[in-house]
Image (tube, rainbow, N blue to C red):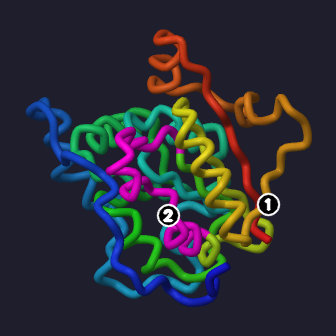
């Protein structure tokens, strides 16, 4: 088990691939020029001692989602849990633009975003800030030679452990069996997390209030089931 109170010293791997896809539509390009600047977490400034100060509305809980993709899950949670402040991380420009469009449409004010490597944000954040961290359908890097680029690692679990509150939750979902097993083994070996499953069906049961994601729908169409793992900080 690593020292959970210190920042990791090893440089992070590149956990994501390409940064941009097809050209943005005019409205998305506008949002990337305007709304992104308003909602972006600025790492050039010192982190506030209380992350709730980042939000223009009162929030009582704090939640981090790493790699939000099209933002379906994040915007659903933000609009159904208005007293929770969310920080969403996504380096892919097109995905960020989609989320910002949803933010504008819904008027959600309890979302802040970060558009680079989540490891940079994690190292900037104050300790004991979050009630929950979500890592949902992360890039599985399926080739064994690329497994070192998977976001779940001992270094990143230590980052998670540091920024979670006591008994805070780490929630992981994937349709890739090798990554599910990888995550279970890494959390076990880390020693700072306990798997909360109580029976054999728990890991196949979606999280409470789960809206589903397009990645989950794609997996089902292709005949793959998903696993939903919840770990508690100890």
Q: Is residue 70 visible?
A: yes
Could you say where residue 78 lies in the image, as x and y percent from the top left? 57, 44
Quarter of the view holding residue 3: bottom right
Q: Give, as a single range, the part of the protein colored magenta.
A: 136-160
What residue sits 25% from the left and 60% below the top? 37
Could you say where residue 193 lies in the image, as x and y percent from the top left? 74, 65
Could you say where residue 41 lies in the image, as x and y percent from the top left? 37, 68
* 144 w.r.t. 176: above or below: below
What residue sits 51% from the left and 52% below the top? 65
Quarter of the view holding residue 205: top right
What residue sits 72% from the left and 71% below the top? 192
Task: Kindly identify which numbered label has been placed on residue 31.
Answer: none
Residue named by callout 2: 56
* 194 w.r.t. 49: above or below: above
46 displayed left or right of 232: left
Task: Kindly identify which numbered label has been placed on residue 194.
Answer: 1
């Amino acid at each position: 088990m690593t020292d959970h109170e210190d920042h990791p010293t090893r440089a992070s791997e590149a956990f994501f691939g390409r940064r941009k896809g097809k050209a943005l539509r005019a409205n998305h390009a506008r949002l990337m020029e305007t709304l992104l600047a308003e909602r972006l977490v600025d790492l050039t400034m010192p982190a506030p001692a209380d992350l709730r100060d980042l939000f223009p509305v009162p929030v009582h809980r704090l939640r981090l989602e790493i790699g939000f993709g099209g933002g379906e899950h994040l915007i659903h949670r933000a609009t159904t849990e208005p007293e929770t402040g969310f920080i969403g991380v996504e380096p892919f420009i097109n995905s960020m633009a989609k989320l910002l469009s949803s933010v504008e449409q819904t008027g959600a004010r309890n979302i802040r975003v970060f558009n680079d490597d989540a490891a940079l944000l994690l190292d900037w954040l104050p300790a004991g800030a979050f009630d929950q961290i979500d890592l949902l359908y992360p890039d599985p890097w399926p080739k064994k030679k690329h497994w070192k680029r998977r976001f779940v690692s001992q270094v990143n679990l230590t980052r998670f452990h540091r920024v979670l509150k006591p008994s805070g939750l780490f929630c992981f979902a994937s349709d890739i069996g090798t990554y599910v097993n990888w995550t279970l083994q890494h959390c076990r070996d880390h020693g700072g997390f306990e798997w909360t499953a109580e029976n054999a069906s728990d890991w196949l049961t979606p999280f409470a209030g789960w809206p589903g994601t397009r990645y989950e729908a794609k997996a089902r169409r292709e005949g793959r089931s998903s696993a939903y793992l919840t770990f508690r900080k100890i």
